Image (cartoon, rainbow, N blue to C red):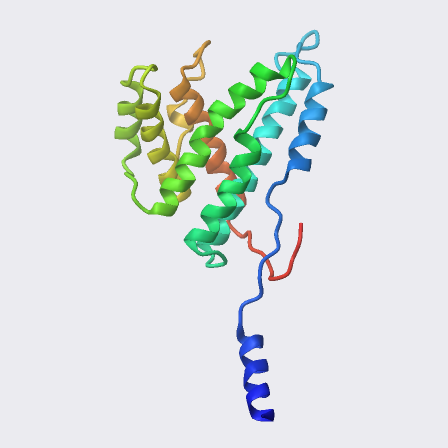
Amino acid sequence: MCTDMAKKASAKQAEPMKLFYIFYNQERWDNWIKTLEGANFEPAEGEEVSEGEQMLYGFAEDITLSVLKIVRLYQNGRFTKDEAAEKLDDVELIVMTGLPDGELEDIIGSIQLSLLVLFTACRKYLDGEFEKDIKTLVKKGRGIDEENLEEALEVAANIGAAVVDGATCCAKYIKDDAENPCLFDEWLIEIETMSNAMKSLAKFDEEPGETS
């Protein structure tokens, strides 16, 4: 009996410890919304970018980093594909469900539209089926009518998945002089944010039992 107990104890010690990292939660979203509600979206005299726009970029970047930490831990073998997909779903439910009332409704709605490519690209990467010829994909995406949202998103998601996989994109494809960038260009901008985030997470990992 003692031998059996010793075997069970040994087997339990050999099991990998569960990860408890909190990637994103409702409180974090609510805190950002509250901060943005108090921000000024009119540029100060002599400034091109307002305080609110700067905060908005930080808000979107924070979500992007949180999502890509999930993918990075999957790459490190900390999560299975199913576990990573489930955690991705959890964050998406917070980020993409509902809109705040008032002046922020349109602003956050625009951010959600931009972040569509983040979640779609990560799922495509986890599935392992995506194209990697970025130059061809960008050309194809730019040729799609904006009304064909799903088709354009599919192309952009391929680019995003390739970036998560290690490809370089998308600064040289972003039109700096475009006054009113199309949605595909907005997705390329988000993918460039994803690219920078993946570089910053190159050494990111989590010790079992760690919380954040």
Q: Where is residue 6 in the image (x, y as percent from the top left)?
A: 59, 87
Q: Which residue is drawn at 54% across and 68% down?
A: 16
Residue 167 makes an appearance in the image: no
Residue under the point 59% across and 81% down: 9
Quarter location, residue 25: top right
Q: How far across and how far down the image is residue 78, in percent?
A: 50, 58
User: What residue do we see at 32% from left, 47% from top?
Assistant: 128
Image-based side of 107 in relation to 52, left or right: left
Side (left or right) of 194 relative to 28? left
Point out residue 211 in the picture as x, y percentages from the top left corner: 66, 54
Tell me: residue 65, above or below residue 106.
below
Above or below residue 88? Residue 110 is above
Residue at the location (48% across, 36% down)?
A: 194
Can residue 62 be seen?
Answer: yes
Q: Nearer the viewer, residue 103 or 176?
A: 103
Give the quarter of the figure containing the N terminus.
bottom right
Q: Quadrant of residue 55?
A: top right
Query: Which one is nearer the viewer's eye here, 192 or 32?
Result: 32
Extreme residue toward the top, this view: 45
Relative image position of residue 208 (x, y in whole percent): 60, 62
